[in-house]
Amino acid sequence: MTKNEKAELYRFLTVAQGWAQGFRVETSEPEFADDGIADSRQEVPRSGFATVDDVACAVAHCEGCPLAATRTNAVPGEGPADLRAIEVMAIGEGPGADEDASGRPFVGKAGQLLDRMLASINLSRTENCFIANIVKCRPPQNREPTPEESAACREYLQAQIALVKPKMILALGRTAAQNLLGTSEGINRLRGSFYDYDGIPLLPTYHPSALLRDETLKRPAWEDLKAFRAELDRLKNAQA
Ligand code: URA
């Protein structure tokens, strides 16, 4: 129990005792012998995971939805080891065959294109960008994750966002954008505009797989990336 939790419980019990006995009791700040030890736990973010590695470990052992039964490897996500270097999170839908085989996000053809897209705006998974997915295990035949599968995985993504604290989020494709924004609007309408995700600017754009299927989407995707970079620079200048 943290110091605040203990103090709150102490105050509650003291006041309850006062009311039970028919008079008010003034409460003072209590001190506990293990305050110093408990205090360190207050650094743990709301999610309950202390580090990104803790999230990855939980994901690796997760049995929270049926996708666990068919995965080869869970794919928690990856980025630079130094979280302070991370400016952006790029979030896709879920692992495909290559990602399931390797345990790493976006390593197939779409991943190679994603790396080039990120590089074009000076972002990379080794320097300043964390790459994650809505679901951490491959849906069979690369089908879209069900709402139940996405919901079962949500705490992991939320924890990653809370720990990484990106300045901005790039939502890759309809599934990512819809899940993050809680909307059923299509990607053609969502893309190109900025939204607020828990205080973090979020831009939906086309998924790299869509760009591989349809060349005509490359131009609007490039416009999105340029707008994303401009907003990131604006934010960084404002914070400097
Ligand atoms: N597509 C995704 O959405 N995520 C991956 O990790 C790979 C392909």
Image: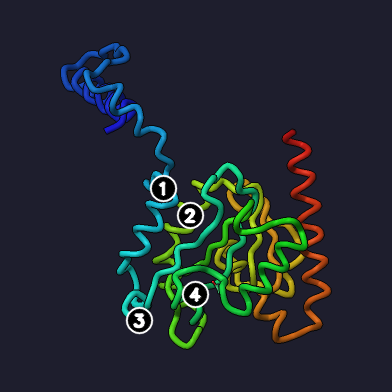
User: Where residue 25 sits in the image (x, y, percent)?
Assistant: 26, 13
Query: Mark 4 or mark 3, which has the lower sequence index?
Result: 3
Query: Mark 1 or mark 3, which has the lower sequence index?
Result: 1
Residue under circle 3? 70
Q: Residue at x 41, y 52 (%)?
A: 53
Q: Residues within 10 Å of mark 4 (few under 14, many from 20)?
A: many
Horizontal side of residue 28 vs 80, given as left or right: left
Q: Which disc number belongs to residue 136?
A: none
**Mark 2 C-beta to ligand 1 under 8 Å:** no
The N terminus lies in which quarter of the figure? top left
Amino acid at pointer 3: Thr
Q: Residues within 10 Å of mark 2 (few under 14, many from 20)?
A: some
Query: Mark 1 or mark 4, which has the lower sequence index?
Result: 1
**Mark 4 C-beta to ligand 1 under 8 Å:** yes
Q: Residues within 10 Å of mark 1 (few under 14, many from 20)?
A: some
Spatial CA distance of label 1 from label 4 is 26 Å
The C terminus lies in which quarter of the figure? top right
Spatial CA distance of label 2 from label 4 is 21 Å
User: Where residue 81 sits in the image (x, y, percent)?
Assistant: 51, 49
Spatial CA distance of label 1 from label 3 is 27 Å
User: Where residue 231 sits in the image (x, y, percent)?
Assistant: 77, 50
Q: Nearer the viewer, mark 1 or mark 3?
A: 3
Residue under circle 2? 158
Nearest to the observer: residue 13 or residue 217: 217
Q: Secondary structure at mark 3?
A: helix
